[in-house]
Amino acid sequence: MQTLVVDHPLVTHKLTVLRDESTQAPTFRRLTDELVTLLAYEATREVPVRPVTVRTPVGEAEGVKMARPVPLVVPVLRAGIGMLDGMTRLLPTAEVGFVGLSRDEESLVASTYANRLPADLSGRAVFVLDPMLATGGTLETVFGMLISRGAAAVTGVSLLAAPPSNGPIPVRVVTAALDERLNDRGFIVPGLGDAGDRLFGEI
């Protein structure tokens, strides 16, 4: 696994407030949105572009525009939904797919219950949004689905990650912090709790 921890004081500040158990859901949602936009800046560093020439009011300038096909953003339900606006703020032309996975609380194995992905992702950059990279099973499952559809590059964006383990699928992740460990329930320690519950309430 290739893990990029974004080292920036604003990232650390926002993450610290997210970790605080006294932070209420409206603030948690707003800060998640802001933090994801900062992470997206790094996650999109290698997004495909094409050279163009544009006319300014005083001459011509060389630059780039996003290459086609447009990127695909894939939030993992349900907690990944809270990250979607922050990501599409930087990629407004991106298309959006969805994957729903639930994790068995005893085996910690993720199983798919929803899948709204294009059948052909040939040549496309894909960004997977999942706030907590704990055991890595969820991202590994989603990455496998995307690679099997021909995705050219897949990057995970997470608020927090546990120390990585190397699985059979190459995983690139951009995160705000790499925490100490997982507890016996598969939660990141010190972490920030259940991101889905803190974003949307317990169900």
Image: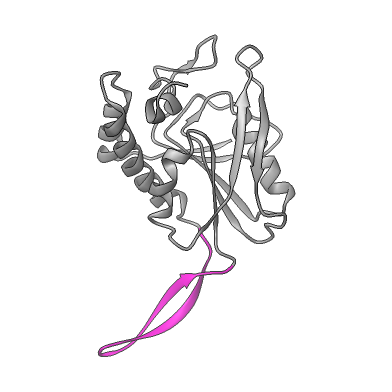
At 41% across and 20% down in the image, what residue appears?
A: 193
At 70% across and 43% down in the image, what residue appears?
A: 145
Q: Nearer the viewer, residue 96 or 141?
A: 96
Q: State yes or no: residue 66 in magenta.
A: yes
- Quadrant where the N terminus sits is top right
Prevalent SS, magenta region:
strand
Q: Left or right: 148 with respect to 15?
A: right
- Please, which residue is most extreme toward the front here? 203
Q: Left or right: 76 with respect to 43?
A: right
Q: State yes or no: residue 176 in magenta.
A: no
x, y (%) of residue 46?
50, 57
Q: Left or right: 133 with respect to 137?
A: left
Q: Is residue 44 above or below residue 55?
A: above
Q: Nearer the viewer, residue 81 or 124?
A: 81
At 26% across and 28% down in the image, what residue appears?
A: 17
Which quarter of the picture shows residue 18? Answer: top left
x, y (%) of residue 125?
58, 56
At 31% across and 43% down in the image, what residue appears?
A: 34
Q: Nearer the viewer, residue 137 or 27?
A: 27
Count of labels shown? 0
Which quarter of the picture shows residue 24? Answer: top left
Q: Which residues are magenta?
A: 47-68
Q: Left or right: 149 with respect to 3?
A: right
Which quarter of the picture shows residue 150? Answer: bottom right
Q: Is residue 123 above or below residue 114?
A: below
x, y (%) of residue 12?
29, 33
x, y (%) of residue 43?
46, 49
